[in-house]
Image (cartoon, rainbow, N blue to C red):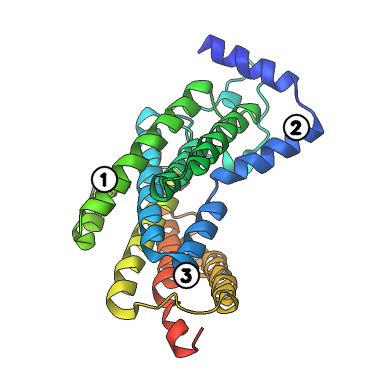
Amino acid sequence: MYWEFQFLTFLQKTASPFFDLFWTLVTMFGEEVILVAIVSFLYWCFNKSFAKCLGYSVLTSITANCITKNIVSRDRPFQNTDWNIENKRPDTADGFSFPSGHTQVCTSLFVSMAIWIKKRWMWVFAITISVLVAFSRLYLGVHFPTDVIAGFALGILFSFLCCYLHQKIQNKLKLYLVTILIATIGLFFCTTEDFFTAYGLLVGVLGAFLFEEKYVNFTLDVSWFKKGLRLFFGLLIILALKEGLKIPFNMIADGNLYLRALRYAIASFCGLGLYPMLFKKFNF
C-alpha cells in the first residue's frame, strides 16, 4: 500500500493542463458512452452476432467488477487524507476502488473485439488502449496500481470466458438467464450506483437481444445512409430515455438504486429491442 501512494504522488507531480486533458480523454475509452456507441453501431449497422457476443462479454464483466468492488470495499487513494492525492476525475470516481472498473470495461470491450476479429492489429490496439486507460486512472488519482492490474487481468479473463460461452452455448435464453440470476446476488448487498447501473444494462440489453431475435429480426441489408440514420436516432432515443426517465423516477424516490437499475434497463431494452421494430415499419 505504501509504495502505491508513493507512485501516485510521483505521478501527480508530473501534472500539467495538457496531461490533465489528455488522460481525461483517454479514460473515456473505459466509460459507458464508448461501450454503448460501439455495441449499438455493430448491432444496428454491421453484425448482430458480433454485437451480442461483445455486449454479453462486457456487461457480464463489469457487473462482476461491481460485485467484487462491494465485497472488497477498498477506499480510493484520494480518500486517504495523509497523502493528499488529488481526484482529477470526480464524475467517474464514485463507489469503491478495487478492481478498476474503467480498466476492466476497456479491456473486456477491446479484447473481446480482438478475439472475434482475429487480427494482429486489433490485438495490438486492444492491449495498447487498455494499458493507456489503466494508466489514466492512476494519473487522475482515482485508483491504486493494484486496482488497475486486477481490472486488466479480470478484463482479459472475462473476455475469453464470455466469448467462449457465447459461441459454444446455442441456447442464449438459458445462458442469459443464468448470467442474470448470478448477477442478481448483488442486489442483496451491493450499495453503489455503479452496480445498479451495470445490472440494469445487463438485464435490458440481454432481454433486448432475445426479444429482437424472436419478434423483430431486422435485416442489415440496407444502405449505409439508412444505417447512419439508425445509429443517429437510436443513440438519441437511448440518451433521451436514460435522462428523461430521471424526472418521474426521482419524483417517486430520489436516489433509489433499484429505480436506477430499472431506468437503465428500460432505456437499453427500448433502444436495442423495441426501436428496431421501426426499421421494418419505416424501411430504414
Residue that carries the numbered disc 1 in the rendered image: 185
- Please state which of residues 250 and 15 is positioned toward the viewer in this rendering: 15
Label 1 crowd bin: few (<14), some (14–19), many (20+), radius 10 Å: few
Residue that carries the numbered disc 2 in the rendered image: 19
Q: Identify the amino acid type marked 1.
A: Ile
**Vertical relation: 242 (above or below) 87:** below
- Please state which of residues 203 and 39 is positioned toward the viewer in this rendering: 39
Q: Is residue 172 left or right of residue 75?
A: left
Residue occupying the point 43% across, 50% down: 117
Label 2 vs 1, first from the N-terminus: 2
Q: How far apart are the two marked residues, 2 and 1, measured between alpha carbons? A: 40 Å
- Please state which of residues 257 and 33 is positioned toward the viewer in this rendering: 33
Label 2 vs 3, first from the N-terminus: 2
The percent position of residue 214, horizontal first and vertical second, equals: 27, 75
Q: Identify the amino acid type marked 2.
A: Phe
In this rendering, the label closer to the viewer, 2 or 3: 3
Residue occupying the point 56% across, 34% down: 128
Query: Farthest top residue?
Result: 2
Q: Is residue 24 left or right of residue 262?
A: right
In this rendering, the label closer to the viewer, 3 or 1: 3
The percent position of residue 215, horizontal first and vertical second, equals: 30, 79
Residue occupying the point 36% across, 49% down: 57
Label 3 vs 1, first from the N-terminus: 3
Residue that carries the numbered disc 3 in the rendered image: 44
